[in-house]
Image (spheres, grey):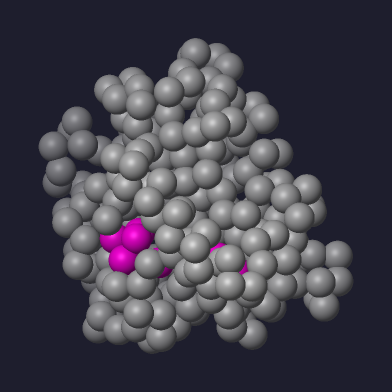
Amino acid sequence: MEVIIQSDASTISLYVARLIRDLVRRKPNATLGLATGSTPLLLYRELIRLHREEKLDFGSVTTFNLDEYLGLASDHPASYNHFMRENLFKHINVAPANIHIPDGQIEGAEVLDYCRRYEEEIRDAGGIDLQILGIGSDGHIGFNEPTSALTSRTRIKTLTERTLQDNAPFFARPDEIPHHVITMGVGTIMEARHIVLLAFGERKARAVAETIEGPISALFPSTILQMHPQATLLLDKAAASKLQRRDYYRWVFDHKPEWQQIS
Ligand code: PGA
């Protein structure tokens, strides 16, 4: 697990955008795992700029999103399908056929088959090369809420009250927020070759401290990232504020070879 602390979200987002740029230039048919929420917004803005101004070509890239609310049409303003279209896909050249976001309108027992097929599609695409993650204030990754099996696969989950509260600002009325979602499982996420988690703000500080310095536990699903061979956690100062070994992570980063550092 590599922990990188930087002053602000903007520096981190530019760095992650460059990681993606380098991956896509090295491997034009790369498979990206994408996240929604407020955390990746600056990252997506920079990817759009790289596409427009530096001709970064997403034409052969495949994408898989982590999750979607069940019961929301894809054009609902709070759906993750809508979020991805507005904040990234309509501005870059990913082929529509290569975009995968769970369908929020799957119903009843069909969900099981649908989730199995989502997993197959990830496998058929050769697995995820780079997975972008945010983190919930309760330690969820994707929508894998506390007590999610750490080996879980794509499936339906029920959101905690805390997540409903955290996500309320994205909805016009609190009673509009679906209680159920489809999410990649923790095990699905862990198969990505490189996991890049971004966390910004004081609200994430406890979840970040548990993830890096706490015991691995299904009560904090993000703690499983300690077992991943290539997980990079990029934190702004506020998100890093509850880490006991903050100085050590900074020291390690400062002593990395120059070519590995954030510029
Ligand atoms: P946020 O959500 O980016 O809106 O903070 C992250 C998450 O819940 O995973």
Q: Nearer the viewer, residue 214 or 28?
A: 28
- Residue 106, position as x, y percentages in the image: 65, 61
Tell me, yes or no, if residue 212 can be seen here.
Answer: no
Left or right of 255 on screen, residue 17: right
- Residue 247, position as x, y percentages in the image: 24, 64
- Residue 3, position as x, y percentages in the image: 28, 57
Q: Residue, x 29% and y 60% (percent of image)? A: 190
Quadrant occupied by the C terminus: top left
Residue 42, image quadrant: top right
Q: Residue, x 67% and y 39% (percent of image)? A: 85
Q: Residue, x 62% and y 54% (percent of image)? A: 103
User: Would residue 183 be counted in the magenta stretch?
Assistant: yes
176 over 122 or under it: above or below: below
User: Would residue 233 be counted in the magenta stretch?
Assistant: no
As drawn, which residue projects farthest toward the right? 173
Left or right of 66 on screen, residue 6: left
Tell me, yes or no, if residue 30 can be seen here.
Answer: yes
Residue 109, image quadrant: bottom right
Left or right of 58 on screen, residue 261: left
Q: Nearer the viewer, residue 183 or 42?
A: 183
147 over 118 or under it: above or below: below
Residue 91, image quadrant: top right
What segment is highlighted magenta in the picture?
181-190
- Residue 136, position as x, y percentages in the image: 51, 70
Quadrant occupied by the N terminus: bottom left
Left or right of 128 on screen, residue 132: right
Q: How many marks?
A: 0
Q: Residue, x 41% and y 85% (percent of image)? A: 147
